[in-house]
Amino acid sequence: MSTQPGSTPPRSAPPRVAAADRGATRIADRVVAKIAARAAREALEHPAPDGSPPHATVTVHHDIARVRVALDLPYPCDLAAQCAAVRRRVALRVEEYAQMSVPEVDIDIEHLRPTPVRPAAGRDRRLR
């Protein structure tokens, strides 16, 4: 192919690069912490009355997230079952949304909030 004087030769298209080879994606620790806190909220069957919402802190190293969740739980309740449900849900959601493995989820129970006691149905609590 001949080119005219003063014109530029046709440029060939750059080689195709696979999407995985174009760069890296980094998810900030605070974003992973928000995912974990939301997952903890989802896992609680009965949140503590007047309690604070779950709060999470996360440390990420490569694709491994170590998570710590602070909770207020109602009292009385099965604390072990509640914590196990939170651990499962947090690990599942972080793995699903952030594509990170979660080898551990530490739970800090910050407060136990008593649940209000309701009078038994059909009983009149008024004095006569």
Image (cartoon, rainbow, N blue to C red):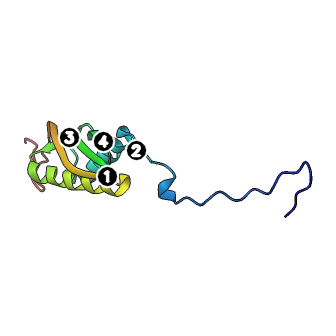
Q: Quadrant of the N terminus?
A: bottom right
Q: Which mark is residue 60?
A: 4
The residue under the point 36% across, 38% down is 30
Asked whether residue 116 is in view, the answer is no
Real-space CA distance between mark 4 and mark 2, rounded to the nearest whole angstrom: 9 Å
Among numbered discs 4 and 2, the one appearing first in the sequence: 2
Real-space CA distance between mark 1 and mark 4, rounded to the nearest whole angstrom: 9 Å
Could you classify mark 1 by the number of other residues whose Cα lies within 10 Å: few (under 14), some (14-19), or many (20 or more)? many
Among numbered discs 3 and 4, the one appearing first in the sequence: 4
The residue under the point 92% across, 55% down is 4
Residue tagged by mark 3?
Answer: 71
- Amino acid beneath label 4: Val
Real-space CA distance between mark 1 and mark 2, rounded to the nearest whole angstrom: 10 Å
Circles 4 and 2, Cβ within 8 Å, touching? The answer is yes
Front residue of 11/82: it is 11
Indicate the secondary structure of the residue bearing disc 1: loop
Could you classify mark 3 by the number of other residues whose Cα lies within 10 Å: few (under 14), some (14-19), or many (20 or more)? many
Residue tagged by mark 1?
Answer: 100
Residue tagged by mark 2?
Answer: 27
